[in-house]
Image: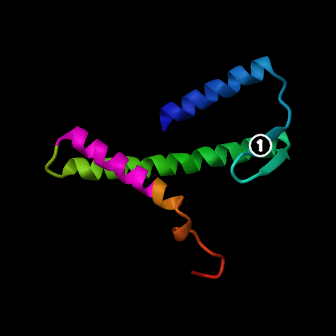
Amino acid sequence: MILVAVLEARRLVLRGSGFPWKGMFVSGLKIHYSASWEPLKGFKLYAAAHVLMAINASVVLGMGFMFSCFNMKPAAATILALSFLFASFVMEHIRFWRSTGNGF
């Protein structure tokens, strides 16, 4: 998490030195949305997204640590954790498992 924070801070400094600090524009390809925010609000949302990504990464790290505590090699624990993550990603994108909006 510290590495990601340092890399993002460096990216923001380098970006700020080359381009003027203006509004933040976001466009989504799959969801078909677009939004434009003022610099402060855009930065707050950007920081909040990184906090949520850090929580997601810590869950995957915790699963990998849990699997490594079992009687198996570290590489097998890593593959098992990544396989679980990949299976979860695939299951999220199956239409059958999506919410229909009526509570089911």
Q: Is residue 67 above or below residue 16?
A: below
Quarter occupied by the C terminus: bottom right
Residue drawn 61% across and 82% down? 103
Rendered image quadrant of residue 8: top right
Q: Is residue 7 above or below residue 103?
A: above
Residue most toward the top? 18
Between 29 and 85, the one nearer to me in the picture = 29
Q: Which residue is mark 1?
A: 26
Residue drawn 63% across and 29% down? 9
Q: Horizontal and vertical percent for residue 53? A: 55, 47
State the extent of the magenta-drawn residues as a range: 73-88
Q: Is residue 71 left or right of residue 78?
A: left
Q: Horizontal and vertical percent for residue 20? A: 84, 24
What kind of residue is marked 1?
Val
Residue drawn 44% across and 57% down? 88
Q: Is residue 21 left or right of residue 97?
A: right
